[in-house]
Image (spheres, grey):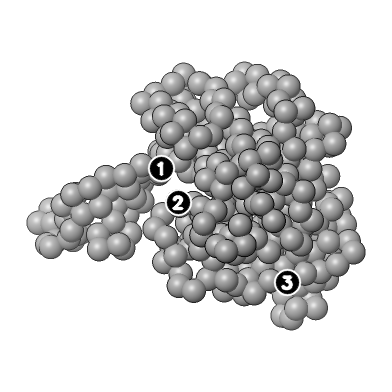
Amino acid sequence: MDWLKRLAAARVLVVGDVMLDRYWFGDVERISPEAPVPVARIQKTDERAGGAANVARNIAALGGQAHLLAVVGDDEAGSALERLLTAHGVKASLHRDPDIATTVKLRVLARQQQLLRIDFENEPSHEVLAAKLDEFEAMLPQVDVVILSDYGKGGLRHVQRMIEIAKAHGKPTLVDPKGDDYDRYRGATLLTPNRSEFRQVAGRWASEDELCAKACQLREKLDLDALLVTRSEEGMTLFAASEIVHQPTQAQEVFDVSGAGDTVIGTLGLMLAAGLTLPQAMEWSNRAAGIVVGKLGTAVVHPEELFGDSE
């Protein structure tokens, strides 16, 4: 199968909360005389596209056509994020809201261990979000699949309307959910909660049978085509109307799980846009997740890593 040609023709629209991930790397050799905290002497810095921007970045890294629609502040971090996305081959439409600051997550690391994370964030205005909704509908004819990446930062305040619009245009809609109000995702094609997120909504389970019952009940209640629960070291399980499919984890060594959910839904959406079935797309997503958790920070998977000899 010529994967590169199929993926190059696949078009995915990502909408949601974007952020700039900044990393400060250094050494810790002493404790501060001012307070009982380590002193990190910074030697290197790095910045990467995070949140929904990382989903789009994962799609572009695999050779797909990634379109991104999001709101950022009219600030230096927003400009940095735009430069990064352009460099990664993402077609980004970033609405600038002068009343907010672009979400930034700053991580301080020493010897590959995270010492501290500092978050800068606030929600976009209703006016900017309304304009984004109009552009969302205008972009739908140009794409095959829609991904809504919710990080709870306010960028998907109109998520129910987006799902309805995408459905009216016949576009499969995948949602990476946040919080405990899943009613707002009603009617989506697929939800991809991780294990703890699903437990927060459905409650605890004591057996696989109980998990299956809870997942199927939620899928039916929300009128979803399928529900994909990512389960860390237990792999991932797809709950569809006609079948339940489980994939054991592919991870060889877990180094950093940040951004793994972005890789899962990005790969899943791209594979569906390339014409694969949900179980087939899930298999590739599971492989991609196993690769990306072996990397530091919000990272991506490249075709040669994912497909190897199968290209």
Q: Quadrant of residue 229?
A: bottom right
Q: Can you give x and y, in whole percent of width and height, for residue 143 in the image?
A: 72, 33
Q: Would you call the spot at circle 2 few (<14 residues within 10 Å), some (14-19), or many (20 or more)? A: many
Split into 4 quadrants, where in the image is the C terminus? bottom right
Q: Can you give x and y, in whole percent of width and height, for residue 247 in the image?
A: 68, 71
Q: Would you call the spot at circle 1 few (<14 residues within 10 Å), some (14-19), or many (20 or more)? A: some
- From this viewpoint, which residue is outermost toward the left? 33
Callout 2–callout 3 Cβ contact below 8 Å: no
Q: Which mark is residue 97?
A: none
> Could you tell me which residue is drawn at 51 percent across and 34 percent down?
89
Give the camera-side residue of 51 and 305: 305
Is disc 3 placed on a helix, strand or loop? strand
Q: Can you give x and y, in whole percent of width and height, for residue 93 in the image?
A: 57, 25
Look at label 2 and name its amino acid: Thr
Is 101 drawn above or below residue 16 in the view shown?
above
> Could you tell me which residue is drawn at 73 percent across and 53 percent down?
191
Q: Which mark is residue 48?
A: 1
Is disc 1 placed on a helix, strand or loop? strand
Report the residue marked by disc 3. 246
Residue 102 in view here? no
Counting residues from the start of the chain, the first of labels 1 and 3 encountered is 1
Q: Would you call the spot at circle 3 few (<14 residues within 10 Å), some (14-19), or many (20 or more)? A: some
Q: Quadrant of residue 20?
A: top left
Callout 2–callout 1 Cβ contact below 8 Å: yes
Report the residue marked by disc 2. 298
Query: In 3D space, how far apart are the residues under numbered discs 2 and 1 (Cα atoms)?
Result: 7 Å
Counting residues from the start of the chain, the first of labels 2 and 3 encountered is 3
Residue 284 in view here? yes
